[in-house]
Amino acid sequence: MKRIYMDNNATTAVRPAVLEAMLPFYQEQFGNPSSIHWAGQAVSGAVDTARAQVAALMNCQPEEIIFTSCGSEGNALAIKGSAEFLRAKGNHIITTAVEHPAVLDSCKYLEKQGFEVTVLAVDGEGMIDLAELEAAICERTVLISAMWGNNETGTLFPVAEIGAIARKHKVRFHTDAVQAVGRVPVDVRAAGVDLLTISGHKFGAPKGVGALYVRKGMGLTQLFHGGHQERNRRAGTHNVPGIVGLGVACELAVADLAVQEGRIRALRDRLEQGILSRIPEVQVNGHRQQRLPNTLNISFAYIEGEAILLFLDMKGVAASSGSACMSDSFGQSHVIGAMGVDAMMANSNIRFGLGLDNTEEDVDFVLEILPEIIQKLRDMSPFYSERAAS
Amino acid sequence: MYSDKVIDHFTNPRNVGVIVDADGVGEKVSSSCGDRMKVFLKVVDGVIEDLKFQTYGCGAAIASSSMMSELVIGKTLDEALALTNDAVAEALDGLPDPKLHCSNLAADALHDAIKNYQGEGA
Ligand SMILES: Cc1ncc(COP(=O)(O)O)c(C=O)c1O
Ligand code: FES
C-alpha cells in the first residue's frame, strides 16, 4: 500500500540536506560551543552560521535570534517573558480565540498571576476585526499576541496591519509564525513584529529545535535560568545538531517559497476543488483568500471526523482533524468553535496539510477514495437518512 | 490505537440500517461528544429476532454498535437488558481510555429500544 502523508501542519519529515548537515555534529564535532578548547570552537562557528541562516529567513539581525527547543517554548518565552518583564508598566494582554494552546494557556496562566487577558473573537472565516483589536488596547496593555497562520484552518492574519496598530500604540507585538514560516514570506521588519516564534519540525528541520526572534531592545524575563547561553536569555547547552539543521531548513525554505506558492498551492486547490465537485454538502473552513497555501480544512455533513480519518488511514492516507493534540480527546476544536461553525460540521472537520513530498497522483488518489468513504459513513448515519426522508 | 476487532467491526459493520416496521425503536445521544445512535428491533416471543442500527459517531462508536448487534441478536430481551457497556468494550478486545464512553452509546440505545418495545407492548 502506498503511504501518503498529508499532515504536514502536524509535523514534517526532516529534509535530506538538513539531516546530512546535522550528522557530523553528533560524533565528530560533538563539542559544547561554550567551551574555549578546540572541540568547542569547532562547533561554535556552526551555531553562528545557523543563527545567520535563521535571521536571513525572517530579515532580522543574527543577535535577535534565540534558539529554543520548540514552538511551545518560544511562545511561552515571548508571552510569559514579556508579561513579567513589563509587569510594572501594565497587566493587560490581547490575544485571539484561535491561537495555539501554547499561547492561550500561557495567557491563562498569566491571568492567574493577576494579568487581564482580552481574547479577540473571529468571524466565520477565522479572521479578527482590526478595529476591535485597536479598541481593546488600553493604557495597561503590554502585549498583543496574534498568530501569523492558523494551524487548523490556515487562515492568515493581517500581520503587518496588526504590527502597525501595535506600533502606533507602542504595544509590544508577538506573533506565532510556527505554521507560516517556510510556507509564506515572513519578514519581521516589513510586518513590524517585535517577537516571532518558529519551530523546526514544521518545515523540514528536526523535532526539538526552534527559535524566537526578539527585536533589539525588547527585554524579556528568562524562563530557564543557569548558563549564559543566548546572551543570558535562555540557559541550556545548545542543541547543536538541531540548530545546524534548523539553519539549513531556513535556507532551503527561502529558496522554496516559490514552490509553496506554486506547486503546493496548486495541489491544495486541486484537492479542494476536486472534493467540492465530487461530494455534496461539504464546507471549507478558513479564509478563502488569506490562507496558507498548503492547508485545506473541510467538513462533511452528517458524519463524524474520526471515522473519516480511520478510513483514510486504512488506505494509507494520513490526514488529521483539527490539531494533532486533539486526537485522543473528544472536545471540539476551539478554532472551529470560535468560527461559529455549526456543531455537526465542526465534528467532521478534516485537515489536509500538503507538503513537498506530495504529488498530483497523491491528490488524485485521495479524490478517488474519499467519495466512497463519505458515502459509506453517511449511509450509516441517522442524520443522513432523516434528511433524505424529510 | 484500536484493536483488530474494532477495526474489523468499524470497516465492515454488521446490521447497519433501519427496520421500517420495527417493534421497538431506541436512541441515545452522547452527553460527552454529541454522537448519536439509533436502534431498531424486531421481537418474536421475547427474543430479538432482528436488530438494525444507525450511528453518527467515531470509529469506536460504530464498532460498538456493530458488536452490540452481534451480541444480542437471538437473545431474549432480559439477556439483552443485562448487556453492559463494559461487555461490549470487552467483546471488542477493549477500547482506548478516552474512547470508553463510546461503547455506552450502543448499550444505552439498545436498552432504550427495548423499553420502547415493552412500553408499547404492555
Ligand atoms: C501554530 C502553532 N504554534 C505552536 C505550536 C507548537 O510547536 P511545538 O510542537 O514545536 O511546540 C504548533 C504546533 O503544534 C503550532 O501549530
Ligand atoms: S467520540 Fe463520540 S462516540 Fe466516540
Image (tube, grey):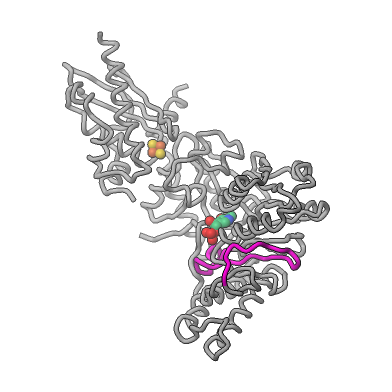
Q: Quadrant of ligand 1?
A: bottom right
Q: Residue A262: in sight, yes or no?
A: no
- Identify which residue is drawn at 37% across, 32% down: B55
Task: Indicate left or right for A113 with B61 as reference.
Answer: right
Q: Residue A232: in sight, yes or no?
A: yes
Quarter of the image that includes the C terminus of chain B: top left
- Identify which residue is drawn at 30% across, 46% down: B7
Q: How many numbered marks does the figure carry?
A: 0
Q: Which region is colored magenta?
A: A199-226
Percent from the top left, x then y, of residue A121?
A: 67, 40
Task: Indicate left or right for A251 with B24 as reference.
Answer: right
Q: Is residue B54 above or below residue A7?
A: above
Percent from the top left, x then y, of residue A281?
A: 53, 36
Magenta-colored stretch includes residue A320? no
Percent from the top left, x then y, of residue A194?
A: 73, 61
Percent from the top left, x then y, of residue A162?
A: 75, 52
Q: Main secondary structure of the magenta part?
A: loop
Image-quadrant location for residue A219: bottom right
- Identify which residue is drawn at 42% across, 44% down: A306
- Depth check: give the residue in front, A201 or B74: A201
Image-quadrant location for residue B49: top left
Report the residue that reaches farthest toward the bottom. Answer: A38
Image-quadrant location for residue A340: top right
- Depth check: give the residue in front, A86 or B42: A86
Q: Is residue A126 above or below residue B50?
A: below
Report the residue that reaches farthest toward the right. Answer: A168
